[in-house]
Amino acid sequence: MRKFFEFGKISEIDVSAQRTWSGDRLFLTFDIDWANDEVIADTHRLLSESHVSATFFATHESPGIKALCEDENLEVGLHPNFNNILDGSTLNGNSDKIISDLKLIIPDAKSVRSHSTTFSSVLCSSFAKQGLTHDVNYFIPDFSEVDLKPWLNWLGITMVPYFWEDDVACIDPNVSEVSSLVRRQGIRVFDFHPIHVFLNTESLDRYERTRPLHQNPEELIKHRFEGYGTRSKLMELLEMVSPL
């Protein structure tokens, strides 16, 4: 018999209530990474057609992100970028300002995943000060064979590990197919990027060579992979949604 699943939002996870994160529940997350609005809308349409909940992590302000915020099936968290501070390419601003500026754009945000999954105890304190309740910065890949579960850290933030990421799946042969991962025990959080969904990326070479077109969706669509790629994997998961 075919098994169906319910898709949840990251901020719905309650460590003390296993039913909120285990059993038939799956979690789709999306790192926006400054994607073009039409690229964002493409992923948004796929989710809307399947009537599923999901969590997006926003990097900037745009009409496309505003549309995500207005969709009651979705939640939009923060995807702050600290790389320019870490590599010394900017002397302006600090981590607190980066987080607070992004929170002004998404004032209702409760969840966070940093760009490049940057995390520290200092950043965690800043997250807490901004009212963020769920942190999704721990990537523990599926091939570690660890059964994952959320936990509360010392500040009361719910730490949510995730085990699958689309760009990692493009480069690492050890990554399992999504159809088998849904049968794993524990919490199951998948991480996609709208740009990889749009391109149906199967190799990071496709992503890199199309960089000049990433803000030109009319041309970018011509480079979408027609085989089994990231978009195909998302559609596989969406086909597992519980029927209405």
Image (cartoon, rainbow, N blue to C red):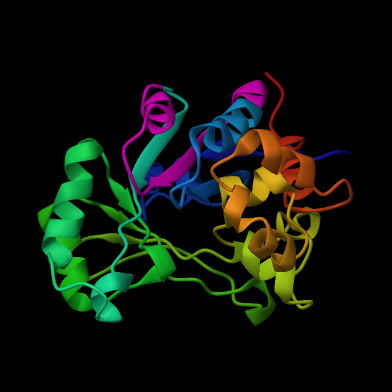
Depicted 191 relative to depicted 172: above or below:
above
Q: Residue at 40% of width from left, 61% of height from top?
A: 136
Say how many tags the image has. Answer: 0
Specify the farthest residue to the top: 244
Which residue: 27% across, 45% down? 110
Which image quadrant for residue 117? bottom left
Residue 191 placement (x, y as % from top left):
56, 56
Question: In x, y percent, where is residue 94?
Answer: 13, 67
Asked whether the viewer can see residue 69, the reply is yes
* Front residue (pair 42, 76): 42
Indicate the quadrant containing the N terminus: top left, top right, bottom left or bottom right. top right
Q: Position of residue 47 (x, y in %)?
A: 61, 30
Magenta residues (range)? 48-70
Res 185 visible: no
Q: Position of residue 59 (x, y in %)?
A: 36, 49
Q: Looking at the rendering, in which quadrant would you find the C terminus?
A: top right
Residue situated in front as seen by the camera: 91 or 145:
91
129 lies above or below 27: below
Q: Quadrant of residue 241?
A: top right
Q: Is residue 103 left or right of residue 166?
A: left
Residue 49 in magenta stretch? yes
Tell me if residue 189 comes above or below residue 102 in the rendering: below
Of 36 and 70, nearer the camera is 36
> What residue is drawn where x is 14% and y is 67%?
125
Nearest the eye: 243 or 53: 53
**Left or right: 226 in relation to 48:** right
Left or right of residue 95: residue 20: right
